[in-house]
Amino acid sequence: MAPAAKEEPAAMSAFERKRLENIANNNAILSEISTTAAKIIPKPAPPKPKRPSAPRRKAEVEAEVEAEKAKAKKMRISGDLNLGDIQVEGRKWEAGLDGLAGLKGLPVRGAQPGVRTFTDEDVKSTTDKGLKDLRLRMSGLKLYEKWPVQDIKIVPQRIYSMGFHPTEAKPIVFAGDKEGAMGVFDASQEPSKVEDDEDEEAELPDPVISAFKTHSRTISSFHFSPVDANAVFSASYDSSIRKLDLDKGISTQVFAPADPDEDLPISAIDMATSEPNIIIFSTLQGSLGRHDLRTKPSTAELWSLTDQKIGGFSLHPLHPHLVATASLDRTLKIWDLRKIQGKGSARAPALLGSHESRLSVSHASWSSAGHVATSSYDDRIKIYSFPDAGTWSAGAELSESQMAPTREIPHNNQTGRWVTILKPQWQRSPRDGLQKFVIGNMNRFVDVFAADGEQLAQLDGEGITAVPAVAHFHPTMDWVAGGNASGKLCLWM
C-alpha cells in the first residue's frame, strides 16, 4: 500500500499575519520599557534569609489563650457596678437583688467616739465565777439549725474574708471569696413550709443567698461604715477598695492606683469611728495607706513600712491613731499616725515598738480594751496588753518589756495551701464588756478565747466537714460565723 501523502500547511491568512506582527511589536515595546526602568530604579536589597521557625504546637497556642483569659479576669473594673448586672450565676444565688430587700431601711447608726465598753474597774472586778459563767454562755452557742451547713454555700469559691453587718435586728453575714465574689446571707429568713400532702422526703428549699462579682480577685477584707448602715466597704487583691450601697444596689470604686496596670494588692482595711471619711489600708507590698473618701485616690498617702507583705493590721477602736501591723518579716509593730516623720520614700508613721516571732505573723487585731492578739506560723496565738495606750504621747518609744506578750497560747496555725490563713478577730464592742476573740481551729472547730488567754469555748456542730478557717464575731451580739474552703457558712447563735 502506497504511503499517504503529507498535508501541506495551509497558507497564513492576512489577518493571522497581522496579529503575529502586533504581538511582536508589543513585546518589543515592553522590553524597551523594562530596560529603561532598570536603569532609573535602583535594585532593591536582597531580602535577608529568614531563620526557619519551628512550628507552634497546639498546646502552646491554647496556653497563650488561657493566659490572656486569666489576665482579663484579674483586671479590675473602675466604674460603678450595678448589682443586677454582676450577679453570680448558679441556682444557689439566683435570689440576686431580691435577697437584699430585707436589708433596706436598716436603722442609721451614729458615731460614738471615746465611748468605752470595757473599763479598768471591769477588769479588776472579774472573778473566777464570772469566767465560769462566761464559759457556760459561750459554750451554749448552737449551730444554726434552719439549714444544714452544706446548704449554706454563700460564695462559689474558698472564703477569704467575712463580716457581720453591725445591726442587732438580725444576723446578716457577708463573705468574700478567692475570685472576687461577695455573698450575703440573712439568717433571719425562714425555710419555705412544705405542704402536708407532699412527700415527707422532699428536699428542703435552698436558703435565699445573694452573690455578686464585685471584684476581679480575692476579697481580702470587709468594713462597715460607722455612720451609714447601708454602706459596706470591701478591699481586694485587684488593688481596689469599693463601697457598696445596699439601698441603691450600686458598688462604687473609692480607691485604686491611678495607673490601671499598677498592682497594689490590698490585704486589709479599717476605719475609725470618729473619722468615717478616712479609710486606712495595708498592702501585700508592705505599705500602709490612708485615703480621704472626699478626695481623689491620687491624693492618698502611702507609706512603705517593710520590704515584705503586711498580712493584716487593725486600728485601736478607741485610740485609732495607734496601728498594729503583722508582717511576713515575723514582726508585730505598733505605729502612731499622729507623728508622720521622714522625707520622700522614707516618710512613715512613728514606730513605737515591735516584737519578733520565730516565724511570720499573719494578723494583728486590737481590742477596745487595749489588747492585741496575733496568730503566727510558730503555732502560737500571742496576746499583748497595752491598757495605758490612751496615755502614750505622740511617737513615744515602747520598751522591750512593754512589747513582750502577756500570754502565749499553743495553737495549730499550719493551714497549708488549701485552707485560708487563721486570724484572730475580737468582738469589737461586747455588750457584756468582756473582751473575747474567735479564731478558726484546724480540727474543724472555732475557738473562743478571753483577753487573758483562757479558752471560753470550742464551737462545733453536725455537718461541719471542712475547717471554718475564717472566723468572725458580731460587734455586739454573741453571734459567730465561720467560713470554709468550699464557700460554705457555719453560724453559731
Image: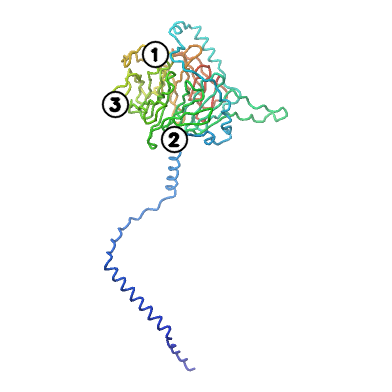
Q: Element type at marker 2?
A: loop
Q: Residues within 10 Å of mark 1 (few under 14, many from 20)?
A: many
x 41%, y 80%: residue: 19
Circle on res. 385: 1
Residue 378 in the image: state x and y as whole percent. 39, 22
Q: Is residue 251 left or right of residue 194?
A: left
The span from disc 1 to disc 3 (Cα, nearest Å) is: 29 Å
Of residues 264 and 491, the one drawn nearer to the viewer in this rendering? 264
The three-letter amino acid code for the residue at tag 2 is Ser
Q: Element type at marker 3?
A: helix
**Residue 379 in sight here:** no
Q: Residues within 10 Å of mark 2 (few under 14, many from 20)?
A: some
Residue 221 in the image: state x and y as whole percent. 45, 26
Residue 482 in the image: state x and y as whole percent. 51, 24
Residue 293 in the image: state x and y as whole percent. 42, 26
Residue mark closest to the camera, 1 vs 3 = 3
Circle on res. 78: 2
For label 3, the residue is: 346
The quarter of the image holding the C terminus is top right
x 49%, y 9%: residue: 131
The three-letter amino acid code for the residue at tag 1 is Ser
Residue mark closest to the camera, 2 vs 3 = 2
**Residue 345 in sight here:** yes
